[in-house]
Amino acid sequence: MSLEITQLLLAWNEGDDQALDRLMPLVHDELHLLAHRYMAGERTGHPLQTTALVNEAYLRLIDSSRVRWQNRAHFFAVSAQLMRRILVDAARSRRKLKRGGDAIHVSLDEALSVSNEPAADVIALDEALTALAAFDVRKSKVVELRFFGGLSVDETAEVLNVSVMTVMRDWSFAKAWLLRELERT
């Protein structure tokens, strides 16, 4: 199925709108699982539900005509990034409305375990990732792909076109750096 997804993405790149129609049923379950991972870390009563997050990401994906899809891993990396942006935008809107909001703070160790436990404050983590990207974009991308995207080390290496060992080193460094940054807030 991975090869079929890649072939459909490449056809979509070439302007085949029917490829998109055939692609979406194949990736829907994985997009839903990805959204579920994100939503599992959100507080109870979050205004977005898993299906709404998938739908919003889908709308942004079909509007992303500038993306030159490489393969399945690239598609899910972009999907993860879009879902992150959607949740960060929603969190910023809530915080703006509440003037400070009631975000739950969790240590990065807990958040980076990628479990069903509550996630770190999405806005604080987004700001820390932006700061990390200011001096090392690749390390920031590794965190985004692994933590937000749920990609494996191998898939992350494939998307970034680096070795597995590079991803593992970047992951270790980024976790330590982000922990230090989040402890300052």
Image (cartoon, grey):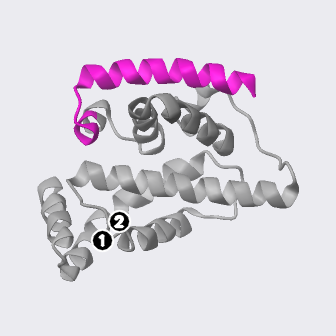
Query: 31 left or right of 118?
Result: left
Q: Label 2's element?
A: helix
Residue type indicated by callout 1:
Met
The residue at which mark 1 appears reads as 24
Q: Tell me the residue at 38%/33% (across/down).
A: 138
Within-10-Å neighbours for mark 2: few <14, some 14–19, many 20+: some
Q: Is residue 148 above or below residue 176?
A: below
**Marks 1 and 2, Cα distance to the nearest angstrom?**
6 Å
Residue at the image point whose x is 23% and y is 30% from the top:
162
Of all residues, the one furthest to the right in this rendering is 99
Q: Residue at x 14, y 70 (%)?
A: 11
Q: Where in the figure is residue 170, as x and y percent of width and height?
A: 39, 23
CB under 8 Å between discs 1 and 2: yes
Residue type at tag 2? His
Residue extending furthest front?
135
In magenta segment, residue 32: no
Residue at screen point 44% across, 73% down: 59
Of residues 44 and 157, which is closer to you in this image?
A: 157
Quadrant of the drawing holding the C terminus: top right
Give the residue number, with chain letter if any, for mark 2: 28
Which secondary structure lies at badge 1? Answer: helix
The answer to whether residue 114 shows anywhere in this view is: no
Q: Position of residue 126 (x, y in %)?
A: 60, 42
The magenta span reads 157-185
Q: Position of residue 158 (x, y in %)?
A: 22, 38
